[in-house]
Amino acid sequence: MDKCEFIVENGKMMKNKILRLREKEILYPTVLSPMAGVTDVPFRRLCRTLSGNRLGLFVSEFVSTDGCAGEALKKRKELIFGAGERPFGIQIFGKHPERMAEGARVIEELAPDFIEINAGCPAPKVAGKGGGAGLLKDLPRLASIIREVRRAIRIPLTLKCRTGWDETNINVLETLKIAENEGVELLTVHGRTRVQGYYGLADWEVIGAVAESARIPVIGNGDIISAEMALDRLERYPVSGVSIGRGALHNPWLFGQIADALEGHAPREIPLEEVLGIFPKYYEDMLESGATSPGALGRLKQLAARLCKGITPENPEFRRHLLSSAGAEIFLERLETVREELRGFHFSPDHLVNLNGKNEDELQFGSQFKK
Ligand SMILES: Cc1cc2nc3c(=O)[nH]c(=O)nc-3n(C[C@H](O)[C@H](O)[C@H](O)COP(=O)(O)O)c2cc1C
């Protein structure tokens, strides 16, 4: 990294990339993107620890406020967060303005740093029912949700959206204007349409255009897999930060590597020994947070499957061996035995072209969902 314009010195980000949430300056312009079934307390702790506490913002997995309010809502596991995970936001989804406002009011009592509205989830059971990315087809409803939620809480309100419903309805600039007018304080744009789902590549030109015309901070989201890519997006587009989802599963050290680069150092390469070494503590943390052993095994495999893709040269045999483990203890034992087999292998996830497992490397194509 020969050029670094955003060096952190004496606890201050130098130059023009200071991510602010209301009056608060966030030291690192990075966000661990919310991922349901992934970014719970143990995974967030993993990313935070491996970054050396140099991760900007944390967001919960999304939680529905439509069907569940009051004390029942407060008991949802998605709302749990640890002391070190600040600033922390809780993300809500739904389609009913009053219920979302009521949910937000209840959630505010748990003292998160911000509440985020989800206008990006593409899943049929969410978007098909008018919530998540479904709100991009009904901007007046989105406006009224933001208005009601805004009225219900005092802490900052943020919004996460996609570029639009499909390629003929790219309306993210309208979404931005509504967000600004209704009091949203930070907007994260995932550069895909709902119909794209997770296929194709994110359109960073659209993200850049939104950031260019915004009066509020805009965070860009989509496909970042390396520190080099993160710095490139921060330099090329007027975004205030980058949000990283699947890239963190492929490489949970990524936030630390980005911080290294921002601080003017070469991002640290991760020895394979260290990669294999993260699993026992991750497992322990999952059990401590209430996961069952089979549930935790699923999560060990989820992470291993992604991490293995970054091991070179490719070794499908090793991957299969780990992923076929019938129990968590067997998985952890096998990790020990493969240590020997993996001499001469390296962890270098930067080479991954895209994150959806398809041979797709062009912009604006591919559709996972019907229009
Ligand atoms: C398994 C999974 C679950 C996700 N759950 C959420 C969610 O709860 N809320 C949300 O706003 N986005 C969710 N997303 C979308 C990500 O936050 C992110 O916007 C998307 O993956 C693109 O960023 P990436 O290319 O860095 O992964 C999810 C994505 C994945 C892969």
Image (cartoon, grey):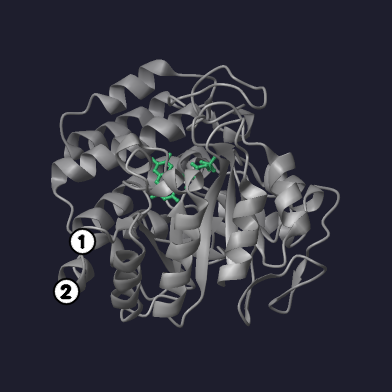
- Please rate how many residues cluster around mark 1, counting C-alpha atoms within 10 Å: few if below 14, some from 14 to 19, many from 20: few
Tag in front: 1 or 2? 2
What is the spatial separation of the Cα atoms under label 1 and label 2, in whole angstroms?
23 Å
Tag shown at residue 61: none
Where in the figure is residue 197, as x and y percent of width and height? 47, 32
Marks 1 and 2 in Cβ contact (< 8 Å): no
Secondary structure beneath dot 1 equals helix
Query: Looking at this view, is 276 or 214 the one in front?
Result: 214
Q: Is residue 253 left or right of residue 258?
A: left
- Above or below, 128 relative to 220: above
Where in the figure is residue 119, as x and y percent of width and height? 47, 51
Which amino acid type is shown beneath numbered disc 1?
Glu
Query: Looking at this view, is 237 or 14 the one in front?
Result: 237
Q: Is residue 120 left or right of residue 213?
A: left
- Please rate how many residues cluster around mark 2, counting C-alpha atoms within 10 Å: few if below 14, some from 14 to 19, many from 20: few
Mark 2 sits near ligand 1, with its Cβ under 8 Å away: no
Specify the quarter for ligand 1. Answer: top left
Where in the figure is residue 286, as x and y percent of width and height? 25, 54
Tag shown at residue 71: 2
- Above or below, 56 relative to 107: above
One can see residue 256 in this view: no
Identify which residue is drawn at 59% across, 61% down: 178
- Above or below, 297 relative to 33: above
Tag shown at residue 288: 1
Identify which residue is drawn at 32% across, 68% down: 98
Which amino acid type is shown beneath numbered disc 2?
Glu
Q: Is residue 123 left or right of residue 333?
A: right
Q: Upstream in the sequence, badge 1 or badge 2?
A: 2
